[in-house]
Image (cartoon, grey):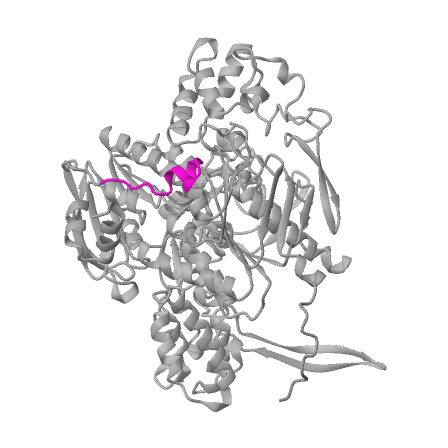
Amino acid sequence: MSMAPRTDTRSPAPHAADSHDLIRVHGARENNLKDVSIEIPKRRLTVFTGVSGSGKSSLVFNTIAAESQRMINETYSAFLQGFMPTSARPEVDVLDGLTTVITVDQQRMGSDPRSTVGTATDANAMLRILFSRLGAPHIGPPSAYSFNTASVRASGAITVERGAKKTVKATFNRTGGMCTRCEGRGSVSDIDLSRLYDDSKSLAEGAFTIPGWKSDSQWTVQVYAQSGFVDPDKPIREYTEKQLQDFLYGEPVKVKVNGVNLTYEGLIPKFQKSFLSKDKESMQPHIRAFVEQAVTFATCPECDGTRLSEGARSSKIGEVGIADACAMEIRDLTEWVRGLDEPSVAPLLAALQQALDSFVEIGLGYLSLDRPAGTLSGGEAQRVKMIRHLGSSLTDITYVFDEPTIGLHPHDIQRMNDLLLRLRDKGNTVLVVEHKPQTIAIADHVVDLGPGAGTAGGTVCFEGTVEGLRASDTVTGRHLDDRATLKKTPREPTGSLEIRGATAHNLQGVDVDIPLGVLTVVTGVAGSGKSSLVHGSIHDDEGVVSIDQGAIRGSRRSNPATYTGMLDPIRKAFAKANDVKPALFSANSEGACPTCNGVGVVYTDLAMMAGVAAPCEECEGKRFQAEVLKYHLGGRDISEVLAMSVTEAVEFFGKGESSTPAAHRVLARLADVGLGYLSLGQPLTTLSGGERQRLKLATHMGDKGGVYVLDEPTTGLHLADVEQLLGLLDRLVDSGKSVIVVEHHQAVMAHADWIIDLGPGAGHDGGRIVFEGTPADLVAARSTRTGEHLAEYVGD
């Protein structure tokens, strides 16, 4: 190839297109941001840090990422926009220089029981095509290997309207791979009927024991009572055989209840649809506890848990079936795929190989494709979402990450850092919300928000290089080089919790004694078996309080006061002081403003355009009727109380005529976990990940339990907040509790009385105890990866 010689040797003037090298944000006011104005360099790695609740997510996700997505959506036709979620423009004066944003967040992956790692990443789709081409015996198209597709057969007459109408016979067949017994779930359930109802009572006497099913008002119960199939006044044990059959297994039929047409259905199918078709992890705690007592889940005997039909299981490539392939650890599956040599499917093998290699590269080679997506931790889910972007040829994209090091051992953080730098070096802008010093250290540009949290935050305290941050006097700058010290005299255990022969997931017959009365940290690389050991062997009972990373589910009506149960004693205190009903002081009940129904804002739906939310003119956003706001407690009305911060409320409910001990106890716990800046009525939907976890911790601190099991409580915590968390853990132990923590943070390891280290690797390379002892002994031995990193951390 020849190139024309260049004759002009003068330096060309800068091209206008090259002047757009910054993302400019001016006047951002989303949530607690206070007219933030910053300039972010493109094609660089920028880390946003600051204490939890300082406004990082509000700036990165709710302003920059949200506006980019909104503007992209506006490029589609009005018809398509009508089917897409709509969002209003963020509260910001100017947003300039935006590029297409890809958000990789911590949201848990789909809770559908049929969703797996393979289906969520398209690896299963490629495997199904591979088996449909190479599998023997050949059983059909890719759908024949899908546990989400049922086989369908139909025949009959159809009318063809082409010219003269004519009726022809037609047959239709679709071969699916779903196991008919478990319907692609891999497990079957057996229901204990005695948990659903008391057969010595009639429906009118309240026979149902299912949570939320009350005879006097619940529509579902009224359907059974007024259906005509059973006698509502006869005890269930006296039903005839036909009545019991209709009651338990009746087919869906229309019945009239109080003049309304409703559907009657037998109790068993109704219960299965209402409870068993949902993921247990998405249920409210009391509902989940009921289902676990009423239902026993067992591996499907027909498909042996593979979810697949007999035909799909019988078709193999060599000695490997698709169920075998999905059950392999991904790093083993990668080697199997690499060994296939079939030119007819070469492009497919190359694409599958690339996808599987990405799993291994990102540190998830220990997973299997049949792993239910709902069981992945927040960090694992985030890394799974990264896979589809690693091999992308797109450039000039803005990638936004929400604490990508969550759930990662210090050994694995370097690998994640390398991936972030690779994305940047391909010409992309990478924005990372992060607290870990190892990731902050690789940033090209740092934005530190604060100085505090909530109303005390929302301003930019520092912009510049990592060295500049280290020299600054911000909270992050002062704590960037913090190092926890090893305890000189660890506490002595008061007993032990014996675990024998633990084999959950990858555990290899683990025997271990977890000491009680001390702070015990269970650690190890990601996938080594920590959660399997702790959550699989220490079951929730009357003596154990388990606080995991599960999301808090709630609508915009939910707030810290309702979630913690604090609002009930507050309402009763208001009711007693004013001699009225407690229901008046609930924005979800009788006290709600009739115009906005207690929401505080009025929403106007504009079809495919973003809806408009305006403060309710009737209640001025206070959510309550004017009559309710006339009632006071300690000189404050209920809306003023809900607007208080936790710190203000601790003082308000602690003394004087407004003294309410039950509310004060909950408020003191919220202040203990560092949430003193939250307002009692702040919607849960506006809380950050770290705030939600600490809210959950504060709520469970009131539970009566001797053993607390915490799953990575430092998630979402700033370096300064970790110090406060360590103090809280110490107070729990000093009060007589046993605290068991699954954790990677070196500060928590160093602070522990006892460490249990699993490994040495992940998946089938893990599942063994590689160290038990004090942190000082672990540092001295340096016999494990954890020991090496902890020794480096404490400077030994």
Q: Judge by depth and name the residue closer to the eye, 242 or 772.
A: 772
- Rendered location of residue 177, percent (x, y): 48, 74
- Rendered location of residue 663, percent (x, y): 43, 22
Q: Is residue 74 left or right of residue 390?
A: right
Task: Name the residue located 54 percent from the left edge and 30 percent from the top edge.
Answer: 455
Can residue 183 be seen at all in this image of the molecule?
Answer: yes
Query: In the image, is residue 602 above or below residue 791?
Result: above
Task: Name the residue located 45 percent from the left edge and 70 percent from the top edge.
Answer: 179
Q: Judge by depth and name the residue closer to the eye, 339 or 780.
A: 780
- Rendered location of residue 753, percent (x, y): 19, 40
Most extreme residue toward the right is: 163
Q: Main secondary structure of the magenta part?
A: loop
Can residue 255 be seen at all in this image of the molecule?
Answer: no
Residue 696 quadrant = top left
Q: Is residue 421 left or right of residue 508?
A: right
Magenta highlight range: 471-485
Q: Is residue 77 left or right of residue 385?
A: right
Is residue 476 a member of the stretch shown in magenta?
A: yes
